């Protein structure tokens, strides 16, 4: 490297002294040449990485990368598109959300700047940490005028918009979901199904083990409107038995690995058409339950059973979820069958469980 003065011929002694003082010594020339392109070299020089992280403004996202090289290479690309929807997609991919869909609010609504994300999967075991990270990353990636207000997967009931939604498929004045410490609302759902075939003893206990010639009665003293009728002449006894059983208040009990009850979820729906496949001796009833957000939080259910003759105590009778201490059995509990499960109850996930009972 040859030094060439850039001062004019009429420069002063002071100006020439300043130039001389700032001249790079000859023994440093080789080093200066080597610095050129140093921050782009790979593998990255470890002593350079901290300065580059500061230069590119990547400190706020450094915890999401295992190496400085990944942080700088991926983070620089993210910084270039920051403030766009693509930046949100990129950032959420760092924590495993690889199939998200961003939905903007109706532009004609007053709060048009709100947007929600279809997350593409459930939050997993590290629910709180992952969702808080997702809220943070979306917040520093999206446009300044936008706000990430809701994420969902598997359970999405929107707020009612007149002329756009059915009344039974929306919520008036709100949308499904809960908050877990941040400002974003989360709405997740998981579906599980199983089947039970009742034993003869379970049918007797449930009060539907009728036979031809036996008087048609309900348990607990409730009788049919035409007393004295028998099962003689009933062409499809299975459907009648199933109908009788479907009128009973039913719960699904969830058990942990120690066989302790986690809680009881009240059946919210049985179908109007109860199937009797192929013959008139057996029938199948479909029971559907759905837990609320946070019901049974922190516990894992490994099996479930249908429960009859359960009554709520200490809480409203229509409560959909009963803790063990809020369930009473004054007439004795009737437990029918078992279904193997693997359900971890979480704060933002509603469990939808369907059980087909064959009697």
Image: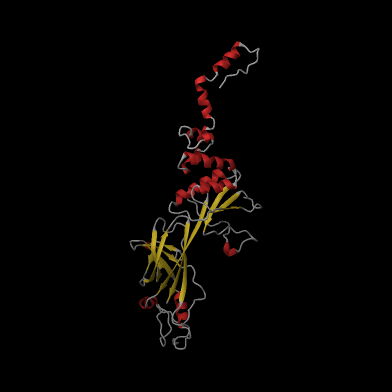
Q: Is residue 240 left or right of residue 173?
A: left
Residue positioned 51% across, 45% down in the render: 136
Q: Quadrant of residue 169?
A: bottom right
Q: Position of residue 170 (x, y in %)?
A: 57, 61
Say above or below: 129 vs 214: above
Residue 54 appears in view:
no
Residue 39 appears in view:
yes
Q: Residue furthest left?
A: 258
Q: Quadrant of residue 262?
A: bottom left
Q: Nearer the viewer, residue 237 or 129?
A: 129
Q: Position of residue 174 (x, y in %)?
A: 56, 56
Q: Nearer the viewer, residue 293 or 1?
A: 1
Residue positioned 62% across, 58% down in the render: 161
Q: Position of residue 341 (x, y in %)?
A: 41, 64
Counting every numbered tag in the picture gives: 0
Quadrant position of the N terminus in the picture: top right
Q: Is residue 145 left or right of residue 288?
A: right
Q: Position of residue 89 (x, y in %)?
A: 55, 49
Say above or below: 252 vs 1: below
Q: Nearer the viewer, residue 81 or 2?
A: 2
Quadrant position of the C terminus in the picture: bottom left
């Amino acid at each position: 490297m040859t030094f060439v003065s850039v001062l004019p011929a009429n420069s002063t002694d002071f100006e020439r002294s300043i130039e001389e003082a700032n001249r790079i010594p000859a023994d440093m020339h080789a080093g200066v040449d080597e610095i050129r392109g140093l921050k782009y070299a790979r593998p990255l020089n470890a002593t350079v990485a901290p300065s580059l992280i500061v230069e590119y403004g990547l400190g706020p996202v450094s915890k999401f990368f295992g190496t400085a090289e990944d942080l700088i290479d991926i983070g620089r690309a993210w910084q270039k598109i920051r403030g766009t929807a693509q930046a949100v997609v990129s950032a959420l991919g760092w924590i495993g959300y690889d199939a998200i869909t961003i939905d903007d609010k109706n532009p004609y609504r007053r709060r048009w700047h709100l947007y929600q994300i279809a997350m593409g999967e459930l939050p997993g075991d590290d629910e709180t940490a992952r969702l808080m990270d997702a809220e943070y990353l979306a917040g520093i990636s999206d446009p300044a005028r936008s706000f990430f207000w809701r994420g969902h997967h598997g359970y999405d009931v929107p707020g009612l918009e007149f002329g756009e939604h059915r009344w039974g498929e929306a919520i008036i004045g709100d949308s499904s979901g809960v908050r877990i410490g941040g400002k974003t609302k989360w709405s997740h759902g998981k579906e599980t199904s199983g089947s039970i075939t009742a034993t003869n003893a379970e049918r007797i206990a449930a009060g539907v083990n009728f036979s031809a010639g036996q008087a048609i009665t309900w348990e607990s003293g409730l009788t049919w409107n035409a007393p004295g009728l028998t099962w003689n002449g009933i062409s499809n006894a299975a459907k009648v038995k199933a109908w009788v059983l479907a009128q009973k208040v039913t719960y699904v009990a969830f058990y942990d690995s120690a066989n302790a009850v986690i809680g009881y979820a009240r059946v919210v729906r049985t179908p109007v058409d109860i199937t009797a496949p192929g013959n008139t001796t057996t029938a199948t009833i479909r029971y559907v339950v759905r837990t609320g957000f946070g019901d049974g939080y922190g516990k894992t259910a490994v099996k479930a059973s249908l429960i009859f003759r359960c009554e709520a105590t200490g809480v409203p009778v229509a409560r959909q979820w009963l803790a063990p201490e809020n369930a009473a059995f004054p007439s004795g509990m009737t437990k029918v069958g078992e279904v193997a499960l693997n359900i971890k109850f979480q704060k933002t996930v509603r469990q939808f469980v369907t059980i087909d009972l064959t009697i």
